[in-house]
Amino acid sequence: MGPENRGQSPISSRFDERNLPQRKSGSDPDFLHRLCVAPMMDWTDRHCRYFLRQVSSSAFLYTEMITTGALLHGNVERHLAFNTEEHPVAAQLGGSEPEDLAKCAKLVEQYGYDEVNLNIGCPSERVQRGAFGACLMAEPELVTDCVRAMKESVKIPVTVKHRIGLNATEDFAFMENFVRTVSEAGCRTFIVHARNAVLKGLSPKENRELPPLRYEYVYRLKRDFPALEIVVNGGISSRPSIEQHLLQVDGVMLGRAAYHDPWVLSDPGNERRKVVMAMYAYAKKILSKETRLRHVARHMLGLFHGHRRARLWRRMLSDAARLSQNDPALLLEALEAVESTSSKETQDERRTQAQPIQVS
């Protein structure tokens, strides 16, 4: 067994849709979100998405949340430019003004994205000050107006990502009413983070961890709305859990688990060496005074998660002195170090196993 397979953690099993549960009875074959990677601020930029695409050829990828103000008054190219290799890929928007969201959805479509997603799940106070994100779950009619305006301006799908509820109130009827109302505007896909959003008193990190997970709410939502595509998100990190969720809903979205251990997404037959070589070629092409190797390498730190030389890999790709040289050859050197060390250890292990036991 070579270094590609030795020492993998339980969540590093290769993801093969052929081995997943069959689609739920009655599910539309056009539902495309079987496996997704969540939009994550400061993480899922274009370099991260390019890297994840080398790991998985089919996972649906999402941009970081982009506010309508950033697109209408900022550098559109900087926010929306992406690599064609990233498909399928969606842009997530944050906003609450229907007219502004419609304009931004049009920009997203013009740039070639496969989908535009509306953020109704972020609980941060900064986002609340902008009057969008999770707080909009309390205003389903406004969200409906936003979705309708977006759908009227584009031909690509408009989807919504939201929570199961707000603050301490756990009420399925609240979420059910939200989904029913918004679906009347033509939204067909709902990505549900199976936790409440606590709007005061918790940080974004605490909001991802402290409110209890209520997967049963998401399952019930699918039973109540069989014609809608329901994707579950929140606390999912292993292949067995992915398979279990797909028995109940149409798709699964992974967040930080996919970032820290991207190999959980990997195609059958894929190899880490192949991914590193692709990223080396990518880095050679895009590095400049503005785009530094560290911008690419930081997303690759988890590639060898579970491997016995994962620490060596991370250390080499975090070496500030080497990164400052902006030389993509560092990726190849780190790969060689991991592989050569693993090969030597395998030989040492075999020699140790072959030595006869000395009996005095």
Image (cartoon, rainbow, N blue to C red):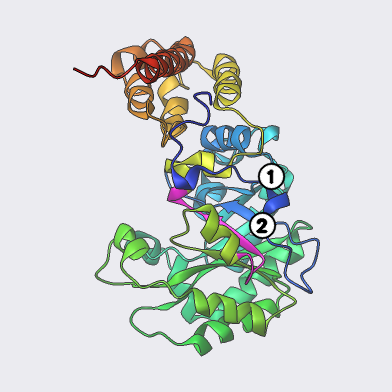
Q: Residue 109: percent from the left, percent from the top?
A: 72, 49
Asked if residue 1 is positioned above or below residue 9 in the image, the reply reads above
Tag 2 residue: 34
Residue 154 placement (x, y as % from top left): 75, 58
Residue 274: image x %, image y %? 61, 23
Marks 2 and 1: CB-CB under 8 Å? yes
The amino acid on which the numbered mark 2 sits, given as a three-letter code, is Arg
Q: Outermost residue, front direction?
A: 360
Residue at mark 2 to residue at mark 1: CA–CA distance:
9 Å
**Label 2 Cα crowd, 10 Å radius (few <14 / some 14-19 / many 20+):** many
Left or right: residue 60 compared with residue 168: right
Residue 327 drawn above or below residue 249 = above
Left or right of 184 on screen, residue 75: left
For this orientation, the residue located farthest to the left is 360
**Residue denoted by label 1:** 58
The total of numbered circles placed on residues is: 2
Foreground residue among 77 and 208: 208
Residue interval drawn in magenta: 246-257
In this rendering, the answer to whether 196 lies above or below 309 is: below
Q: Residue at x 24, y 70 (%)?
A: 201
